[in-house]
Image (cartoon, rainbow, N blue to C red):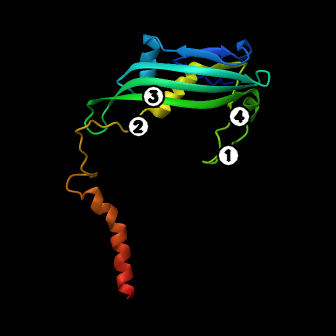
């Protein structure tokens, strides 16, 4: 029997749902230096310069559902995709989501969510919401996947020396189509 090993959570701040008071529950969290370094590795950053998150948790319907409003603030340093020079970027992002105990059961079923629909509820697992992991996931979604230095230039793609620039390669299918249409006339 093999057991699946869960990856370590770099920034964990578990909140027991039953400990939440009725109404607004506010939390402000920030990673320590070891957690920051681990998050930087997770997201392939040169450095996670600063990172913090604020949460407002509102239990609903006897703590079987929790509405979450959050905001993350971060400064990251990544390598430029063209020059590999360090690029700094500031992130400020507000978000909201809902956690529910019913979502844990639904997690096993396949979900089909359309672009115009709200995200499905996140699961409350063993009565806990990990707001540290929520913050880390939101950070990962907001990091620029293609950071570029201000002066970086990219002059097209060539697969080998002497090959044509990407612009002319991309035009070829349309040129061939035009030639076919011209021959039919």
* Rendered image: mark on residue 112: 1
> Where residue 89 appears, x then y in whole percent?
36, 29
Q: Residue furthest front?
A: 23
Does label 4 or label 2 sit earlier along the sequence? 4
**Distance in Å between CA atoms under marks 4 and 2:** 28 Å
The answer, for residue 14, to whether it is visible in the render is yes
Name the N-terminal-most of marks 3 and 4: 3
Crowding at mark 2 (Cα within 10 Å: few <14, some 14-19, many 20+)? few
Give the x, y percent position of residue 113. 65, 45
Q: Which mark is residue 92?
A: 3
Q: Looking at the image, which residue is at 28% across and 39% down?
A: 82
Q: Residues within 10 Å of mark 4 (few under 14, many from 20)?
A: few
- The circle on residue 107 is 4
The answer to whether 52 appears left or right of 77 in the picture is: right
Relative side of 7 to 67, left or right: left
Looking at this view, name the residue that lies furthest to the bottom: 185
CB-based contact (under 8 Å), mark 4 and mark 2: no
- Image mark for residue 156: none
Q: Which of the two labelled residues, at mark 4 and mark 1, occupies the earlier sequence position?
A: 4
Circle 2 residue: 145
Q: Secondary structure at mark 4?
A: loop
Q: At 25% across and 46% down in the image, what residue appears?
A: 154
**Which is in the foreground here, disc 3 or disc 4?**
3
Q: Secondary structure at mark 2?
A: loop
Regarding residue 7, the answer to whether it shows in the image is no
Q: Cα distance, mark 1 to mark 2?
A: 25 Å
In space, the residues marked 3 and 2 are separated at their CA atoms by 16 Å
Q: Earlier in the sequence, mark 1 or mark 3?
A: 3
Please name the residue shown 52% across and 30% down the image.
94
């Amino acid at each position: 029997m093999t057991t699946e090993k869960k990856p370590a959570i770099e920034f964990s701040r578990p909140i027991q749902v039953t400990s939440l008071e009725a109404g607004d529950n506010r939390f402000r969290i920030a990673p320590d230096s070891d957690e920051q370094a681990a998050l930087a590795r997770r997201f392939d950053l040169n450095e996670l310069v600063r990172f913090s998150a604020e949460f407002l948790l509102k239990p609903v319907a006897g703590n079987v559902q929790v509405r979450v409003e959050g905001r993350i603030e971060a400064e990251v340093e990544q390598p430029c995709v063209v020059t590999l020079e360090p690029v700094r970027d500031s992130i400020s992002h507000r978000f909201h989501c809902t956690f529910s105990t019913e979502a844990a059961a639904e997690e096993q079923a396949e979900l089909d969510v359309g672009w115009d629909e709200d995200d499905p509820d996140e699961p409350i697992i063993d009565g806990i919401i990990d707001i540290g992991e929520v913050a880390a996931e939101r950070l990962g979604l907001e990091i620029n996947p293609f950071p570029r230095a201000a002066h970086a230039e990219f002059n097209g793609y060539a697969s080998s020396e002497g090959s044509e620039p990407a612009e002319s390669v991309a035009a070829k299918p349309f040129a061939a189509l035009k030639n076919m249409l011209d021959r039919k006339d």
